[in-house]
Image (cartoon, grey):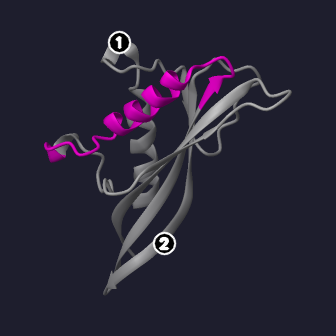
Amino acid sequence: MIKATELDAALHARLSGISRAAGYLTDVAEVYGPLDKIRDRAQTPYIQFRMVRDGRSDTAGRQALRRREYAIEVTFSKGASAAELDGAHVDVLRALGFHEPDVDKRFPGLDDEEDEAEPQYPVDGVTTMRLIISIAVLYTQTY
């Protein structure tokens, strides 16, 4: 399997584990991949992730070190509080093992020196708001 495809599947699995029952602050209703269609009036909060860019940073023979950047969009109803958005940001990073000392619990290749969160608040006529969390993963692909 292509390494990037494996990363997408692993990210989906990690994000799908975010629930109050598992000790998180957020109860994620559903996780959608980049090509999944989200139905109208889907229960919130839900997550949709997508690859933003994937670039080669180094090569050695037939192998390349690549950096894959993701946008993880957590969608809430427009009535959600700022604390709920903050909690979702923390939960996503926790689910990925951000700065986890036990490397077996960390998301493989997570670049934990860089992440970012950007809220998109509702405007007139929009019934949801989003928190877009940006992360990056380093991986090796053989060609």
Quarter occupied by residue 35 = top right
In-image side of 56 versus 81 (left or right):
left
Q: Is residue 12 magenta?
A: no
x 38%, y 57%: residue: 137
Which quadrant is the C terminus positioned in?
A: bottom left
Q: Is residue 76 visible?
A: yes
Type of the residue with mark 1: Ala
Type of the residue with mark 2: Gly
Which quadrant is the N terminus positioned in?
A: bottom left
Quarter occupied by residue 109 = bottom left
Q: Position of residue 3 (x, y in %)?
A: 39, 59
Is 46 placed above or below 73 here? above
- The residue singled out by tag 1 in the image is 21
- The residue singled out by tag 2 in the image is 55
What mark, if any, has residue 117 been given in the picture? none
**Where are the magenta residues, as a range?**
75-103
Q: Is residue 99 magenta?
A: yes
x 48%, y 23%: residue: 83
56 and 115: which is toward the camera: 115
Q: Position of residue 45 (x, y in %)?
A: 57, 23
x 69%, y 31%: residue: 38
Is 19 placed above or below 13 here? above
